[in-house]
Amino acid sequence: MSEQENPVFAIEKLYIKDLSVEVPNAPQIYLERESPGVAIQMQTTAQVLGEGAYEVLLTVTVTATIEDKTVFLVEVGQAGIFRVLNVPEENMEQLLSIACPNILFPYAREVVSDAVTRAGFAPVILQPVNFEGLYASRLEQEQEGVPPDASIQ
């Protein structure tokens, strides 16, 4: 097998594509003593940039609420440009939906924790995510005709 036929998977660039922090009820919300409920949503998208280049975007949204008041809302779009060559087409979706988000997740987790802390709250430490399980669940839902739910609570 020649060098040109070997599969290639490389990280070209990792970056924050979007970062938003909102504390809509400040400063009064800092006087609350009740612990907020936290909801986490994740979504991944991938797009072709050119020959063998793909951008994968992992968007993590963390919303903390006390009753009907938003304590904070943090949204992070952690992205990466990946070079993928000589990989069979039937493996591309798994690579872009599982392997790439696994690489991006630790960076997104760090940005979320840092943003929440800088907003004046205790850090939110995101638990590890099984992207392979999420991918399998999404495929199963698509086969059943149910719209996918990427929320993690």
Image (tube, rainbow, N blue to C red):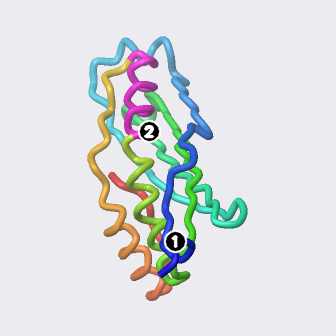
Q: CA distance from mark 2 to mark 1?
A: 48 Å
144 up-or-down from 132: above or below: below
Give the percent coordinates (x, y) of residue 32. 34, 18
Q: Which residue is painted at 52% across and 77% down in the image? A: 2
Q: Which residues are magenta?
A: 107-120
Quadrant of res 89: bottom right
112 up-or-down from 140: above or below: above
Residue lying at the far front of the rendered structure: 2
12 up-or-down from 131: above or below: above
Residue lying at the far right of the rendered structure: 50
Give the percent coordinates (x, y) of residue 11. 51, 51
Q: Which mark is residue 63?
A: 2
Tell me the amino acid under the disc marked 1.
Glu
Q: Main secondary structure of the magenta part?
A: helix
Query: Regarding mark 2 in the picture, which secondary structure is present there?
Result: strand
Residue 114 counted in the magenta span: yes
Q: Which residue is painted at 41% across and 51% down in the image? A: 103
- In front here: 9 or 113? 9
Tell me the amino acid under the disc marked 2.
Thr
The residue to which callout 1 is attached is: 3
Query: Which of marks 1 and 2 precedes in the sequence?
Result: 1
- In front here: 104 or 138? 104
Give the percent coordinates (x, y) of residue 20. 58, 32
52 up-or-down from 86: above or below: above
Residue 146 counted in the magenta span: no
Give the number of marks. 2
